[in-house]
Amino acid sequence: MKVYAKQEFELSDTQSDGRSLREHLETVQKTIGRKPKELEDLIELPERFSECWSWFLTLNSTRSAGFGISAITYSEMKSFFELSELYPEPWEIQIIKLFDNVALEVSRDKQNKADKKNKK
């Protein structure tokens, strides 16, 4: 699941023209008539985790950001689930936290690369 989440965050990364890496690669696929290496053998999320991914994406889209992104808090999750009248199992909350940790890691890595680039 961590590999799936990391792959999805990297593919959804916005490029300088405002389009995602996935959009660029799909354009290349249409142009050359075959999948670029980056789109081959993508990890599939097991079906039992798709609802957790959907919940995470909703929570992720409402995340506050200042000097970088902050972790999604349990109180934010509680509010989301109460407002949505959903009752997740404890393991589902842990999966959402796992996805969130990967999102934070990818964001930190991206910021570190940008900082190194700006120092040059």
Image (cartoon, rainbow, N blue to C red):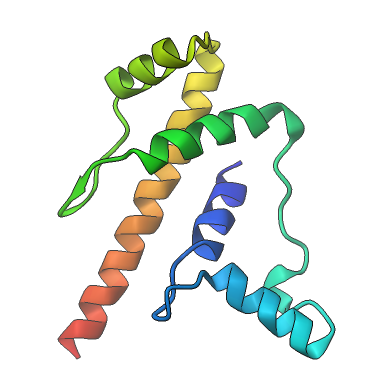
Residue at the far right: name it: 33
The residue depicted at 59 percent of the width and 78 percent of the height is: 24
105 left or right, relative to 118: right
In this view of the protein, which residue sits in the foreground, 35 or 86? Answer: 86
Residue 12 to residue 37: above or below: above
- Picture quarter containing residue 32? bottom right
Which residue shows up at 48% across the image and 30% down it? Answer: 96
Left/right of residue 33 with respect to residue 98 in the rendered view: right
Q: Residue 116 placed where, x, y %? A: 23, 79
Task: Please give left or right for residue 14 compared with residue 92 in the image.
Answer: left
| Residue 43 x, y percent position in the rendering | 71, 53
113 or 68: nearer the viewer: 68
Quarter of the image for the N terminus: give it.
top right
Q: Position of residue 44 (x, y in %)?
A: 73, 48
Quadrant of the image occupied by residue 59? top left
Answer above or below: position of 12 versus 1. Answer: below
Where residue 18 sits: x, y (%)?
A: 42, 73
Horizontal side, residue 117 vs residue 67: left or right: right
Residue 119 image-quadrant placement: bottom left
